Structures are given as structure tokens and as C-alpha cells.
Amino acid sequence: MATQEELASVLDAVREAVPTLRRNGVEAEDRRWIPDENLELLEKAGVFRAAVPRAHGGLDFDAAQQAAIIAEVSRGCPSTGWLTMVWLTSAWAASLYPDQAQKEVFEGGSSRVSIVFAPTGTLKPVDGGYRLDGTWRFNSGCRGAGWDLLAAMVEHPDGTSEELVALVPMSELTLADDWHVSAGAATGSSTTTATDVFVPAHRVVPLEEAMVSATGDRANTGATGRNYGLLGYIMSSVAATFLGMARGAYELFVERLPGRGITYTEWTEQSLHPLTQVQVATAANKIDAAEALAGTWHQVLQDAADAGTQPSDEQKAVIRGRTAYAAQLSKEAVELLFSASGGSVIRRDTHLQRFHRDIQGFALHALVQRDANLEVQGRVLLGLDPGTYFL
């Protein structure tokens, strides 16, 4: 298990990188992909070793420790934070594959893996594995990953079908130059295509087994403290991204205040206006409330992983609701600060506007939809079943 000294070392290095990550924001959006400098700084800090098992030279941080790193990166650059979340959670997902696959992916101790859950591909059984065909959109981080996790459907001889997840080297896939968006522009979430790609059997697992860390042919099973419920773990990391973005936006807002007046009024210092004081306090409380919620789901996830069990469906449903609500609180804080920033905030060289656009875009992701997730949570609070298997 990782030590607090190892975590502190990574966090300190990321904090030192935050000003550079922010400064590179305009360039990142222009090129629709983060600069190499961002990757180099995070690699040097040890970020991409965070989710890699200790047996393969990684740092093996737990879910809460990974979330702290993701939030810190997101404080510097929302798009870089989103990519960090994808790469860490997907690297952890790769640790659910057979030992042979893990050795291939984690060789060297540092790894960046991307993932697409939508099963928009097909797998055809052949000797020794499968043939993969398909196209996957919104493949965040694919331009900087070494491997890709791609969901696909396989039809069995009895006519039934099953969703599997194939682990494929990025070098065997084709990337389209089609990422032209108004939010998350620097994530390079291009469309990825596989054409008759052979995937050996040890690099394919059933999604149903992966959801509950029940995959086999690997040494790291049982009560290792890392066999989390997949969706709850991923959503905890997504929420960390939102929390980091909100903290970054808060800092940027406060930094802009000194010497700023309120145009067409007699207020020469915006910070002296009671409304600004209320807005800052409200935003800070929303962010702190989101962070307090995070402690509840991290405890549930870690307790189960330490015991070698899974959270109950009811607990998983609550995690879905709470993570989405924390993301909503973070988004509301950024919206409030943006609206209180005056017309100059829309300048591209003003970092706060990029935080605002990115968090708006990321909040549209299906995993973060507030009402859909609160519905799942609300159902179990009322004694009903969750209404979905995706927990």
C-alpha cells in the first residue's frame, strides 16, 4: 500500500505544476489537446503511477488518494484534470484483467489507459481470442494513451449476446480528427475505430464481472483494498474532477477582485459590496459541502474493498446520487462566481471563463446527470429497487 509520504510527494509536485497548467490553457484549447509540457509535468510527478498496482511498479493509491490527485490537477486545468481522471480510472480497470494483460499494460510502472463504455463495437470469436470491429465516439484521452478499453457486443452460438470490454493497444486503432467542441476542447476526445483487430482472449473481460471486480485469472483478487465497485469508484473520481474545477474557479475569482470596481456604480472595490460577500460565501459553502459528501462515499468504497466485498446495491445507488449532487454543487459554485465576474471575464486569456465552459460541458456527461442519478438514489431511500443494473 502507498505511504502518506508518497502521496504528499505527488500532490506537492502537482501543486507546483498548477500555474503552468493554467497558463497553457489557451494553447491547449487551440490545439484541441493538452501541451506536451502538461503530460511531462504529471509524468514526472508520478501521477500516472497512482492507479498502477504495486506489483507492477506503481504507487497503488486508494480511491480517496487518487481523487485528491485528480482534484489538484483539475484545479490547474479542467481538461487536464478530466484526462487524468480517465487515465487513472481506466488504469485501475486494467488491473481487473488477467495477470498476462496487466504485465503488458503496466510494464514500466506508469500507464495511461482510455475507455469507452458505450458498446458500439462487435467482437467475433476466433482461435485464441476475438476480432474487434467498431467505432467509439467521445474517447477522452485516446491521443495520449497507450491502451484503450472498448466495450463491444459478442453473439454466442445459442443466440444470446453479452457485453465484453476489450483491452487494445492504441497503435492498432485509427483516430479521427473530429474533436471540435465548445467545452472540454483540450481533451482530444476523438472518435476511435477498430477494423478487424485481433484481441487475444486474455485481454477481454465481461462487463458484468468487471462491474463487481469479479474477473479471474489474476493474482490481485479478494481483500486487497483495491477491488472496488467499478461504477462507484469511477463516479467518485468524476466528482473529484468537478470539485477541483470549482476550487480552481474560486481561487481565480478571488485573485481578480483587488482593484476591481463595479462598472456604472460608485463601488470602486467589488469585494466591499455585500452581494459579492454573499456570493463568495455561498460558492465556498457549496464547494465545502461537495467535499464533505466525498468522505461518505470514499468510506463506503474503501470499507468494502478492504473486506473483499462489494457495497450493497442500496449503497451503490446512494453513491450515484451523492457523486452527481456533489458535481452539481461544484457546477453551481462556478456558475455563481462566473456571473459575478463582470464582462471582462469572457476574454479567452481570463482563465475563469474556461473553467466555466468546461464544467458546463462535463456536467452533460451521462454519468453526471443530476436528475437521473438522484432518481436512482431516491428510489432506494423510498424502499424501492434502484431501477437499473448500472450501479
Image: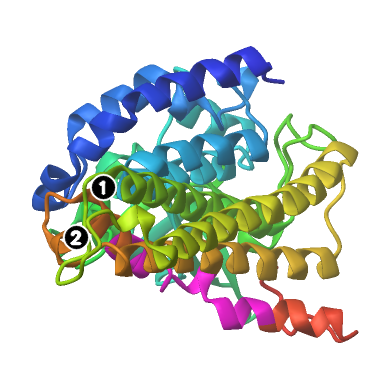
- Asked whether, in this view, residue 304 is left or right of residue 219, the answer is right
Q: Is residue 372 magenta?
A: yes
Secondary structure state at the residue bearing disc 2: helix
Residue 232: give x, y in percent of width and height: 67, 57
- Asked whether, in this view, residue 273 is left or right of residue 391, the answer is left
- Asked whether, in this view, residue 90 is left or right of residue 61, the answer is left
Residue shown at 71% from the left, 38% from the top: 217
Residue shown at 65% from the left, 57% from the top: 289
Q: Which callout, 1 or 2, points to the residue nearer the camera?
A: 1
Residue 206: give x, y in percent of width and height: 63, 59
Picture quarter containing residue 84?
Answer: top left
Sequence-wise, the earlier of marks 1 and 2 is 1
Name the residue beneath numbered marker 1: 256
Secondary structure state at the residue bearing disc 1: helix
118 shown above or below 32 = below
Q: Quadrant of the N terminus?
A: top right
**Magenta residues, as a range?**
357-374
- The crowding category of the residue bearing disc 1, from other C-alpha atoms within 10 Å (few below 14, some 14 to 19, many at least 20), is some
**Which amino acid type is marked by label 1?**
Arg
Picture quarter containing residue 180?
Answer: bottom left
Q: Is residue 205 magenta?
A: no
Residue 254: give x, y in percent of width and height: 36, 47
Q: How is the image coloured?
A: rainbow
Name the residue beneath numbered marker 2: 345
Residues at discs 1 and 2 in contact (Cβ within 8 Å): yes
Residue shown at 90% from the left, 84% from the top: 383
Q: Nearer the viewer, residue 228 or 378?
A: 378
- Asked whether, in this view, residue 217 is left or right of residue 82, the answer is right
